[in-house]
């Protein structure tokens, strides 16, 4: 004990001595600066502007310095940072840093007025390069005044082949209605018609179902989304979201695509001489950069998976290479250092969503989730819920340990009425040096753990009237949805994946275990053992010659339930975006104790995004349950049509669907394919004009000269062009390209300023000596706003002609004039020679 006391006292003494030493050093620096300020009042201190050199290389920059009569040298902190020198202590950019005793080796060349630094890499600020490169500026987000109606029309029919009496079994119209402006967007979604869901709840003979109604406003300056109406609460890995009616405030970083929110990995290095650096991630080159001498860091490497391997190649002017292999790890739960992400909701729980239009619990609830990036390697997370007699809270953290993988862990506690409970969660991911990926997660509840989803559902689920108002089929479907009212007692998952070195290909093994809460077993309509499962899955896939692929999957439930099988198949492309393939499967039948073997063959063609493209599929399954099914789809200028059919035994069925949109933006109307995010209505001024979006052909304008582009991305750069070669000869467009960034789920109108009946023509302009007018000379039509610029060989493109026209051209030192008569048929290919004098 005495030894421990002596050691503790010694540690305290040493720490105090170090603290006193640091304070003394800071005091000496402040005194030195104060002395310099005092001497500066006299005639001794010199204010200097010096050319800075680092390790013998000129930085090309000047630094502000002060030299006292006794030789104390100080430089502005901001200037040190600009030349890549790491100041010894923190401070403001205008603060003076005393170099004497700072550990920075320097030399002052008075005759040349130069300041030399001789530094190690640790004393220099690394030059940072963004692997994303130079990104084009994104224009300010805008929104027109307008509206949108997305619709899906659906109908299905079935009949027996031997008793051919086809009848409509279901018909519906689904709508997504939006009204938008610069001040937000109002949305309303619903279904009208006869569907299975309506048959469950038709006590009032209604054929309409409201899904969601909400108003949303997005503020790009604060990256905040405000929402009122129907919404879904935010959630973390170990919590469950829920639908509610009320309000929501949440951070939405997608409004600023220029901000890197994910904690992406970076690579650091140093170059002895100016060199080129190439970075390869998983064998693919993703970045190349010329770097100057000294330390550097390449940030925001695009690693899409949790693990990756990077190779850094540094090549100098003589061709010498230095290669470094690194392992990269990311954790999708991490956010960049200093960022705060959150969501907050308050309202009333939604019940029987997609079954009833306006069924809400009458007790208010509150929910909130948050993440904060402490560093790029550590993010803290939290979640809280309150209402319906429930108090629930949790706290967790996500971190990564470099090549040792990433870890997320959390603990939760709840009190519902008088019942107490807890929950633990942990997940771990790593890529081993042998190239084997490993991930595991576990979630375990203790006691009577509850959340808002269970607290609000238990109230109406326990009411037997919710079950017996309807048919037995309804009861069973509802009970199936209520199997997991409470958080499961246990969820475990383990996965292994690797590339096989000998036979090639990829193999993976997954074990999944889920055990429901004992309180949920009363809702089971079948044996209780069906409620818990332990499933083991193994799969193998590899590429085959001729761009083919092979897969094999084996699965089995090892919890005592006889549920297991094997699937295997191959596929090959045969050109024209067509794939063909086949396979076999065997599934264990618990009723017979034998395996059921089946075979299938399929062929398909994927539909592309451009108008006029089509797709189809055909599949035949032969076995205990033999069937044939097929589908055809076609993308028209006004929407997408799909037809599918199925034949099984003595029965056939079919369905038809058409989806599209009707859009309005600033009094421009257009119809076209369904809009998912945002859209634009292009006005090209003439029919048949080809329009492209981000260099991909969208289609041609309709008879009104407009076209709906349904694929714009909110808050991102969208480039829209028209093809001048497709404009009619008498139409002139002011511009051919527009870059827009629409607001959240809204639309914009793009008018290219096309002018019809412009009567364009090409003038060949010469002086009275027959010499072409100088290139770049500017002119205009007299008594008109039509201006032009003279091009090569004296040619100028002019519009808005009358029968008799006069022009005036600015030649720099004087003006010249000319006249000409317009031909009866104008056009961009017609030329008229005009003398300007």
Image (spheres, rainbow, N blue to C red):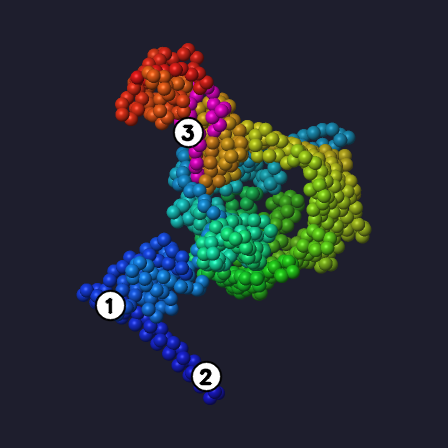
Whole-number angstrom distance, CA of label 2 to CA of label 1: 47 Å
Q: Earlier in the sequence, mark 3 or mark 2?
A: 2
Q: Position of residue 803 (x, y in %)?
A: 36, 12
Label 1: few (<14), some or many (≥20) within 10 Å?
few
Label 2: few (<14), some or many (≥20) within 10 Å?
few
Q: Position of residue 572 (x, y in %)?
A: 71, 40
Question: Does residue 724 show up magenta in the picture?
Answer: yes
**Foreground disc of the pair 3, 1:** 1
Q: Nearer the viewer, residue 200 or 370?
A: 370
Q: Nearer the viewer, residue 109 or 307?
A: 109
Judged left or right of residue 152, residue 667 is: left
Q: Earlier in the sequence, mark 2 or mark 1?
A: 2
Q: Residue at x 62, y 34 (%)?
A: 607
Q: Is residue 837 visible?
A: yes
Q: Which residue is mark 2?
A: 7
Quarter location, residue 816? top left
Q: Earlier in the sequence, mark 3 or mark 1?
A: 1
């Amino acid at each position: 004990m005495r030894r421990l006391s002596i050691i503790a006292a010694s540690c305290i003494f040493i720490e105090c001595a170090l603290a006193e030493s640091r304070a003394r050093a800071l005091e000496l620096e402040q005194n030195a600066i104060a002395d310099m300020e005092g001497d500066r009042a006299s005639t001794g201190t010199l204010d200097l502007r010096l050319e800075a050199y680092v390790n013998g290389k000129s930085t090309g920059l000047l630094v502000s310095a002060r030299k006292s009569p006794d030789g104390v040298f100080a430089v502005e902190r901001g200037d040190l940072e600009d030349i890549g020198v790491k100041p010894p202590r923190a401070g403001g950019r205008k603060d003076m840093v005393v170099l004497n005793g700072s550990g920075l080796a320097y030399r002052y060349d008075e005759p040349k007025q130069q300041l030399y630094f001789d530094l190690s890499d640790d004393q220099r600020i690394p030059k940072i390069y963004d692997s994303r490169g130079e990104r084009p500026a994104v224009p300010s987000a805008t929104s027109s005044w307008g509206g949108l109606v997305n619709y899906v029309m659906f109908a299905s029919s079935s009949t027996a082949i031997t008793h051919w009496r086809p009848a409509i079994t279901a018909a519906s119209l689904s709508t997504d209605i939006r009204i938008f402006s610069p001040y937000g967007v109002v949305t309303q979604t619903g279904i009208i018609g006869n569907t299975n869901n309506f048959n469950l709840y038709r006590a009032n003979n209604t054929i309409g179902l409201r899904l969601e109604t909400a108003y949303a406003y997005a503020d790009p300056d604060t990256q905040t989304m405000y929402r009122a109406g129907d919404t879904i609460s935010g959630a973390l890995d170990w919590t469950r979201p829920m639908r509610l009616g009320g309000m929501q405030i949440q951070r939405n970083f997608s409004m600023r695509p220029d901000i890197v929110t994910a904690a992406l990995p970076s690579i650091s290095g140093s170059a002895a001489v100016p060199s080129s650096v190439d970075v390869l991630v998983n064998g693919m080159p993703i970045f190349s950069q010329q770097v100057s001498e000294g330390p550097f860091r390449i940030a925001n490497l695009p690693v899409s998976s949790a693990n990756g391997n990077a190779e850094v190649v540094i090549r100098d002017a003589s061709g010498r290479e230095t290669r470094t292999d690194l392992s990269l790890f990311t954790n999708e739960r991490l956010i960049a250092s200093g960022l705060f992400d959150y969501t907050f909701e308050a309202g009333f729980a939604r019940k029987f969503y997609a079954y009833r239009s306006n069924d809400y619990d009458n007790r208010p609830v509150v929910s909130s989730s948050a993440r904060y990036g402490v560093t790029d390697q550590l993010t803290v997370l939290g979640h809280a819920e309150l209402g319906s007699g429930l108090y629930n809270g949790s706290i967790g953290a996500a971190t990564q340990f470099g090549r040792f993988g990433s870890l997320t862990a959390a603990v939760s506690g709840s009190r519902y009425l008088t019942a107490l409970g807890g929950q633990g969660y942990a997940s771990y991911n790593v890529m081993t040096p042998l190239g084997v990926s490993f991930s595991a997660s576990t979630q375990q509840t203790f006691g009577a753990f509850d959340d808002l989803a269970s607290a609000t559902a238990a109230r109406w689920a326990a009411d037997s009237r919710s079950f017996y108002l309807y048919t037995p089929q309804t009861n069973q479907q509802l009970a199936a949805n209520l199997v997991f009212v409470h958080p499961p007692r246990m969820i475990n998952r383990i996965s292994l994946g690797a590339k096989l070195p000998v036979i090639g290909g990829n193999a993976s093994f997954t074990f999944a275990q889920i055990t429901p809460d004992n309180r949920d077993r009363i809702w089971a309509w079948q044996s209780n053992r069906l409620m818990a499962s332990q499933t083991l899955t193994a799969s193998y896939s590899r590429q085959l010659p001729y761009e083919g692929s092979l897969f094999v999957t084996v699965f089995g439930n090892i919890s005592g339930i006889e549920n297991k099988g094997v699937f295997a198949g191959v596929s090959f492309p045969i050109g024209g975006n067509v794939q063909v393939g086949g396979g076999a499967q065997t599934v264990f039948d618990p009723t017979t104790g034998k395996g059921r073997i089946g075979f299938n063959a399929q062929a398909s063609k994927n539909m592309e995004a451009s108008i006029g493209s089509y797709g189809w599929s055909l599949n035949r399954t032969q076995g205990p349950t033999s069937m044939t099914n097929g589908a055809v789809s076609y993308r028209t200028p006004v929407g997408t049509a799909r037809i599918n059919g199925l034949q099984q035994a003595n029965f056939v069925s079919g369905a038809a669907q058409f989806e599209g949109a009707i859009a309005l933006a600033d009094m421009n109307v257009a119809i076209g394919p369904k809009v998912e995010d945002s859209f634009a209505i292009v006005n090209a001024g003439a029919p048949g004009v080809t329009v492209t979006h981000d260099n991909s052909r969208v289609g041609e304008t309709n008879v009104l000269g407009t076209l709906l582009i349904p694929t714009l991305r909110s808050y991102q750069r969208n480039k829209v062009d028209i093809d001048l070669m497709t404009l009619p000869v008498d139409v002139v467009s002011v511009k051919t390209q527009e870059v827009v960034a629409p607001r959240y789920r809204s639309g914009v109108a793009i008018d290219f300023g096309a002018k019809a009946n412009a009567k364009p023509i090409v003038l060949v302009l010469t002086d009275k000596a027959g010499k072409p007018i100088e290139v770049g000379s500017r002119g205009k039509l007299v008594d008109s706003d039509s201006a032009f610029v003279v091009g090569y060989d004296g040619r100028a493109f002019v519009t808005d002609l009358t029968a008799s026209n006069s022009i005036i051209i600015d030649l720099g030192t004087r003006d010249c004039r000319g006249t000409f008569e317009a031909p009866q048929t104008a056009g961009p290919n017609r030329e008229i020679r005009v003398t300007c004098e």
